[in-house]
Image (cartoon, helix red, strand yellow):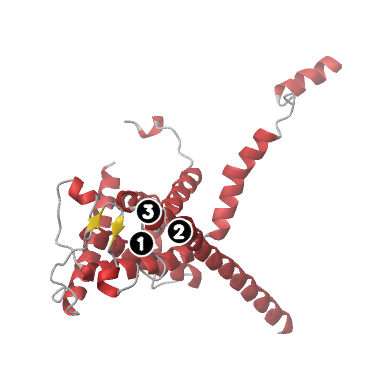
Amino acid sequence: MMKTLMRALIILVAALVVVGATVAAAQQTGALASDGGDRPQFDGGQTDFGQASSGAPGGFLVREGESGEGGWAELAKNVGVVGVLVVGAVLVTKGLKVVGRSEAQSA
Amino acid sequence: MNGKNAIPVNSTKTNLWLDIGLFAAMMLALTPALTGMTIHEWLGLALGVAATVHLLLHWQWTVAVVRRFFGHLAASTRLNLALNIGLFVNFVVVVFTGIMISREALPVLGISLAGGHAWEGIHRQAADLILFVAGLHVAIHWKWILSATRRYLVAPIYGLLHRPAYAAPTGWAIVVARREAK
């Protein structure tokens, strides 16, 4: 139990180091200074998250919107991205094995 | 608590169920348009705890690989560790910036942070990136996922559906039956 707590503490310290580095990087680039603490407002389902700052409704892949609005399509897209990566990785691994085998046979 | 009396834990089974839960929760958390902001934020915070448990379950592997990182180690294992470190950093950034711009979860707890558009931008970009990095993480462990799913998910379901009408005699029952036949 004590050992697990110590390990969790190490993970927490590592996370805090990452947080510190993120804040330092954000301050160094001046992103936080020019921000002015202008928080987006949430008004019962309608949101201006992403629109006020960039004019785009959310990120490239992870988009925000009204709850339920195209949500299933977004979920399918996210799962699809992971699926494509898995299929790609499996094909690359198999391809490398085939290349390695043919090289060994020709040598 | 005596360690000898502890109930044995099937680590592969535990890992499989935790990982299935983590994957499903992450996919949902990355779809705020489906869940709405309240579930998105609470799910994100819960993912932070679940990811810590995931790391604790793989602690021994992590320590062993970190110790041998600059020594003799297979290239795939080194790549795996580098990807895992990247995923950890990415995950921490997503959760931290999410906390900074929280509009639902933290105010309920009575905490209000002065988040801004800069944190929003970082949160969004890091969330885009985590989809790819987590996807690669799944891809690298695909063989394990497939074999564990077959063993602990597909096989038990198949066994339930194709259960024999009678119990086949095994062990002592066979020995007794043979003696009686003689």
Measured along the vertical axis of the image, is residue B152 above or below residue A9?
Answer: above
Q: Is residue B120 visible?
A: yes
Q: Distance between the residues labelled 3 and 1?
A: 8 Å
Q: Mark 3 points at which residue?
A: A67
Measured along the vertical axis of the image, is residue A2 above or below residue B136?
Answer: above
- Position in image of residue B88 (x %, y %): 34, 63
Amino acid at the residue labelled 3:
Ser
Q: Mark 2 points at which residue?
A: A70
Among numbered discs 1 and 2, the one appearing first in the sequence: 1
Q: Provide the chain ID for the residue under circle 2.
A: A
In the orientation shown, which residue stands out farthest toward the top? B180
- Front in this rendered view, residue A84 or B133: A84
In the orientation shown, which residue stands out farthest toward the right? B182
Q: Mark 1 points at which residue?
A: A64
Q: Which residue is drawn at 47% across and 64% down?
A: B135
Amino acid at the residue labelled 2:
Gly
Residue B133 occupies which quadrant of the picture?
A: bottom left
